[in-house]
Image (cartoon, rainbow, N blue to C red):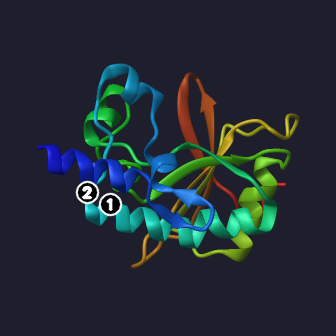
Amino acid sequence: MVELLLIIHQNKKMQLTRNFSLSELIKSDTAIRLGISNNPNQDQIEKLKLLCENILQPVRDHFGRVTVTSCFRTAELCLKIGSSINSQHCKAEAVDFEVIGVANAEVSDWIHKTLDYDQLILEYWTPEEKNSGWVHCSYVEENPRKQYLRAFKEDGKTKYKPIIGTAI
């Protein structure tokens, strides 16, 4: 048990790319508050590394500082927050983030035009408020869907609409 805790502690310090660490991608205030372990296994760590290399690091290199608001979630954490265990967050394939000072629509449009991704969702963004919402992006190596969507609330439910071209 002590050896396992030491491995988990060492993994949390792991740099996945130049600007992103494992600890930043698994941090969850909800998990901490509820005493839920949010530690990925080795396969999930590899997927998080791919997510950083193919999405987060290129965004950081182009726009500057990226703030990750949610990334990896264990199945237990997903259930506690009302998400699905089938979520790409649970599979270590998705990240929610913002770039401070840059409109989320601008960031998502750049990703759509520049990077390979699986699913890109401009979540709860409104044109009147450029910093509203956040960007959700997933990455898979094989058969990416290249879906570009906008999430919004209608009648109290989240709905998704494809974005054709750009959001702006």
Residue 3 vs 155, above or below: the answer is: below
In the rendered image, which quarter contains the C terminus? bottom right
Mark 2 lies on a secondary structure that is loop
* Badge number at residue 44: 1
Q: Position of residue 28 (x, y in %)?
A: 45, 34
User: Distance from label 2 to label 1 (Cα)?
Assistant: 5 Å
Question: Could you tell me residue 142's position as x and y percent?
Answer: 39, 79
Residue in the picture at 36% in, 68% down: 46
Q: Specify the amino acid type for callout 1.
A: Gln
Tell whether 138 sits left or right of 43: right
Does residue 10 appear to the left or right of 145 in the view shown?
left
In the rendered image, residue 72, in percent from the top left (x then y), is placed at: 41, 48
- On the question of residue 139 being in view, the answer is no
Q: Which residue lies furthest to the bottom in this view?
A: 142
What residue did someone put label 2 on? 41
Q: Which quadrant would residue 132 be assigned to in this image?
A: top right
How many residues crowd mark 2 within 10 Å: few (<14), some (14–19), many (20+)?
Answer: few
Q: Do the residues labelled 2 and 1 touch (CB within 8 Å)?
A: yes
For residue 149, above or below residue 58: above
Tell me the element at label 1: helix
Residue depicted at 33% across the width and 40% down the height: 38
The answer to which of 66 and 151 lies nearer the viewer is 66
